[in-house]
Amino acid sequence: MTRWCCVLGLLWFTAAAAQELPPLEEAFDQGVLVIAAEHSCYRFDIYIAETRAQQRRGLMFVRSMPATTGMLFIYSNPAYLSMWMKNTFISLDMLFVRADGTVASVARDTEPQSLRSVAAEEPVLYVVELNAGTAERLGIEPGSRLFVDAEDFLVE
């Protein structure tokens, strides 16, 4: 009985936390990201996570995302950044990006709701999250280049 109460309590807490969060459109600035892959360029509408609170939230509780949408995490200094999938219900591709806008590494098809750390292989300044399978489908690999146009932020 106690076990079921704990499970139900956890489900209630998770549902309540999700309902308290404002929609992504209200919580994040938005911009446009272009990724130059090996043979073409691809445009994405992005949510920008610059503050610590935005970075903690990320794409938590998102149940689906359009194919041309993603999230850009911007950090103040290059570091061996790591992400996790806590309360993230969709699988993602994570692009770890150097300060010069080039992709350092790609973590593909991350496991939804996992607490396992997904880490950069070298110091990076940005992380981009896209729907799982996007990097492979579009040929986004280490060395691909990002161009971001967003309010008060430009990588070229």
Image (spheres, rainbow, N blue to C red):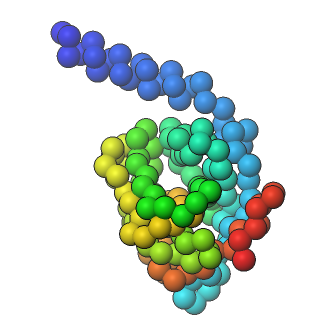
Q: Position of residue 3 (x, y in %)?
A: 20, 16
Percent coordinates x, y for residue 137 in the rendering = 47, 75
**What residue appears at the point 74 percent right and 49 percent down from the top-left corner?**
29
Q: Position of residue 55 (x, y in %)?
A: 56, 46
> In front: 153, or 72?
153
Tell me which corner region of the image, top left, top right, bottom left or bottom right, holds residue 105. Answer: bottom left
* Residue depicted at x 35% and y 22%: 10
Residue extending farthest top = 1
Quadrant in the rendering for residue 52: top right
Q: Residue furthest bottom?
A: 39
Give percent across and percent down for residue 48.
Answer: 67, 53
| 116 is higher (above) or lower (below) than 104 | above
Q: Is any part of residue 73 visible from this angle? A: yes
Is residue 90 shown left or right of residue 151? left
Q: Which of the image's four quarters has the N terminus?
A: top left
Residue at the limit of the structure toward the right, as seen here: 151
Q: Quadrant of residue 51?
A: top right
Number of labelled discs? 0
Say whether residue 72 is left or right of residue 141: right
On-image quarter of the C terminus: bottom right
User: Which of 3/98 is in front?
Assistant: 98
Height in image: 46 above or below 41? above
What residue do we see at 62% from left, 56% from top?
Answer: 76
